Image: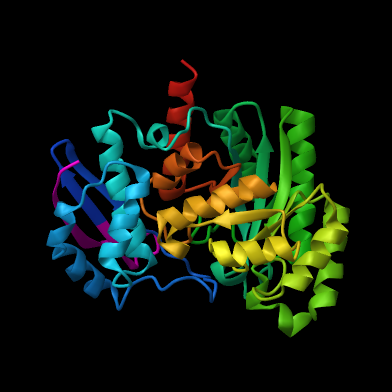
Amino acid sequence: MQIKKVGAKVVRDSRGKETIQVFVKTGKGKFTTSSPAGKSTGKFEVRSYGGNLKGDIWYINNLKTIGKLDIQKFEDLVKVEKLVGKKLGGNSLFALEASLLKAIARENGKELYEFLGGKKVRLRSVGNAIGGGLHSLGVRGKKPEFQEFLFIAKSKSFSESVKINKKAYRIAGKLLKARKRNDEGAWETGLSNEEVLDVMDEVRKIMKKKYRGVVDIGLDVASSSFYKKKLNSEGQVDYLNKLIKKYNLFYVEDGLDENDFLGFHELLKKAGKQCLIVGDDLTTTNPERLNKAIEERSINAIIVKPNQIGSLLKVKEVIDICKSKGIKTIISHRSGETMDDTIADLGVGWGVDFIKTGIYGKVREVKLRRLATIEKGSNR
């Protein structure tokens, strides 16, 4: 593949914050990727930018020698990483490498997901329905401590599961009498954690009885932002285990502090196989932290956010490790999103188990629409 030009510029994400968009131009066209940005970030994530956003943009716009690299396959990204070294942060490296992969896929006459080895959509949709924590303003000064309350529909079809999640989301809004949404499109509320879970449990019953839709319930606790102020590790484990049993929770993400591998281990042991105990801030899409979590038996599922680590080689390494060890994978959006849908193709291409997005809002739904398009095409 002959690279004619690479370039970068500033674009705005869904929160109005500046982020980076990178393009790669070849004889087959121009291929772009924009990077999202998280509001609640783990301390072990790589830096978003090498120095700052403008510095990374300048560097990419002056990266003339990249055109001399022979890049034909996914593994050739190692040449790019050797060239840029540590000059770029996670946002910039992800956007550059993803744009290169799109260009290589086109050179091979394939969609990105096909080039990466994917054939069918096998993911389930994890949808953020009700907000709290750092993502929420709440109502009249009150809000849940947990960051996200999630619906996870079960269906043979991905497109149908998205419809089920949306129906559950609308019912939840009516029960909450919600009028506002947060920056991920989730309903705002002044209820407590357990009051919200009561509402979600009611939604689950309505969906099953009235619409014959099966919906699981999940939490993104984002515990690092608050739990030491409320409970110690042992107390947090007991509290979450009580909620898992009471509400038959299917999914609990970041239930403890981002360094508490032992606490995660205890929660996983008590929760049993019926619940996914998910690492995000704990693992930050980092092979080394993932391996530690596996050794400590801390998780049975992991969030995969490509810009947490930047290198798509390492993202695939994380996914490969998980497959070999029976760890479920959830490729995820960030709070500050763009209209980029790359994670949908990565999810299908690498055979991940779930995709986590919002249920409402154009920057969330564009990922779901891309998956619906892939599903429709692969079923022909």
Q: Tell me where residue 291 appears, x and y as whole percent.
A: 63, 62
The answer to whether residue 350 is magenta is no
Residue drawn at (49%, 50%) of the image: 316
Q: How many marks?
A: 0
Along the viewing direction, whichever of 134 and 48 lies nearer the viewer: 48
Residue drawn at (64%, 46%) of the image: 324
Q: Tell me where residue 134 appears, x and y as whole percent.
A: 57, 71
Along the viewing direction, whichever of 203 and 254 lies nearer the viewer: 254
Residue 114 in view, yes or no: yes
Residue 34 in view, yes or no: no
Q: Tell me where residue 190 appears, x and y as whole percent.
A: 67, 67
Residue drawn at (36%, 45%) of the image: 74
Magenta residues, dominant SS class: strand
Q: Tell me where residue 355 appears, x and y as whole percent.
A: 55, 45
The answer to whether residue 6 is magenta is yes
| The residue positioned farthest toward the top in the image shown | 380
Up/down of 266 relative to 339, above or below:
below
Q: Which quadrant would residue 352 be assigned to in this image?
A: top right
Q: Which quadrant would residue 208 be assigned to in this image?
A: top right
Along the viewing direction, whichever of 6 and 338 lies nearer the viewer: 6
Residue drawn at (76%, 37%) of the image: 206
Q: Identify the magenta region.
A: 1-21
Up/down of 349 relative to 42, above or below:
above
Residue 225 in the figure: left or right of residue 237? left
